[in-house]
Amino acid sequence: MESFEIEIPKMEHFEVDVRKKELYNYDFQSYSLTPLQKEASLVVANKIRNNLFAHIPEAKLLKKLVEKNDNDNVEYVAKLSEVAKEKLKSGEWSYGIRKKTGETYAVLKDTESGKIKSSVTLEKRTVKELGNLPELSAIQGQLASISEQIESLNELVIRVEQGQYNDRFSGFFSARQLIVEALATRNEQLKKELLLSAIKENNNTIAKLMMSIYTDGLDFINIKTNSKDAKRINTLLQQSISYLSSAMQLNVVAYTVLEEHESVIAVLSNYKAFTEQTLLEPKYDGKSLAWKIDNFTKGNSSSFINLTQSISENINALVNHSETLLVEEDTNERREN
């Protein structure tokens, strides 16, 4: 397993503040999802914290985080029978106490007579066995990396004026609101239902946007298209690409909160495949659609194709890294079993 760091925020930071204006951005010129991703990261961090403390008492955890001795990665936990648990609970039995040191040791005694009634089986556990924490931690790190790349694409594309908002993109705002409400609720069942609704809404939006980009792209590079129509199509094309990038981010956020790692990979793989096949594949007289966009757009820049390639490469690296983590986790689980 690759090394990783877990940063646990303070308890007061775990509450989602639904009053933050940054979560509800309707200027139609910037679709930054950084505030929403920060809230999602806190949800993941809270799950990491809960998983940590479920395995190790808080005092022991703090000690083990400070000390670096490999021997401290091992602890022994008393494995008690149901009978022993009941007698301990009633006070009939108690653990043995060393007179000189006051330490508790692995023997059960009759509380009144002091006679030994049972020995205690000690189960060896390692601090490193923390369920799917490495996977959760990796997803948390992916959020920031994906966000930076996709938001760079969003900032690059040409924006439309507020009055030109098209209702075919309303699915993005609907899904975003569902995710905000999901992050805010404390009811786990409701949280799951809201996130699943957001994903379904968002997938419909993504499919429409992909078809829009494909058909608008073909019209844009058609030599028979007059300049006025080309300008209009280019604006719609750029807007669709921007919404697609943001919609993909929403699904990454939703699946991260649901701890569905394979689904995060599916979202990234889908985005990568569409980007490569629709924007980067040189099937238009030996040139790609991204290249055509750069050369038909005012300024004749190559920044769009360069950034699109960079995003594709980064997503590919994230997918490969995620798959490596899953393989390692599966191998470790088989060894433990």
Image (cartoon, rainbow, N blue to C red):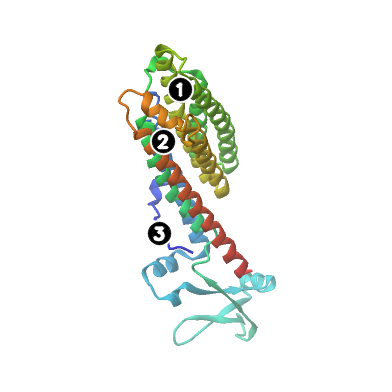
| Residue 269 percent location from the top left of the image | 53, 43
Q: Which mark is residue 33?
A: 2
Name the secondary structure under disc 2. Answer: loop
Answer above or below: position of 115 versus 235.
Answer: below
Q: Is residue 162 above or below residue 54?
A: above
Nearer to the camera, 210 or 245: 210
Label 1 crowd bin: few (<14), some (14–19), many (20+), radius 10 Å? some
Distance from the alpha carbon under mark 3 to that under mark 2 = 24 Å
| SS type, badge 3 | loop
Q: Is residue 16 visible?
A: no
Task: Describe the element under mark 1 as helix, strand or loop.
Answer: loop
Front residue of 300/250: it is 300
Q: Nearer the viewer, residue 246 or 107?
A: 246
Mark pair 1, 2: CA separation: 31 Å
* Residue 284 in the figure: left or right of residue 87: left
- Classify 280 as above or below 6: above
- In the picture of the structure, the residue carrying the numbered disc 3 is 5
Q: What amino acid type should be assigned to the residue bearing mark 1? A: Ile
Q: Mark 1 points at which residue?
A: 221
User: Type of residue at label 3?
Assistant: Glu
- Can residue 155 be seen in the rendering of this structure? yes
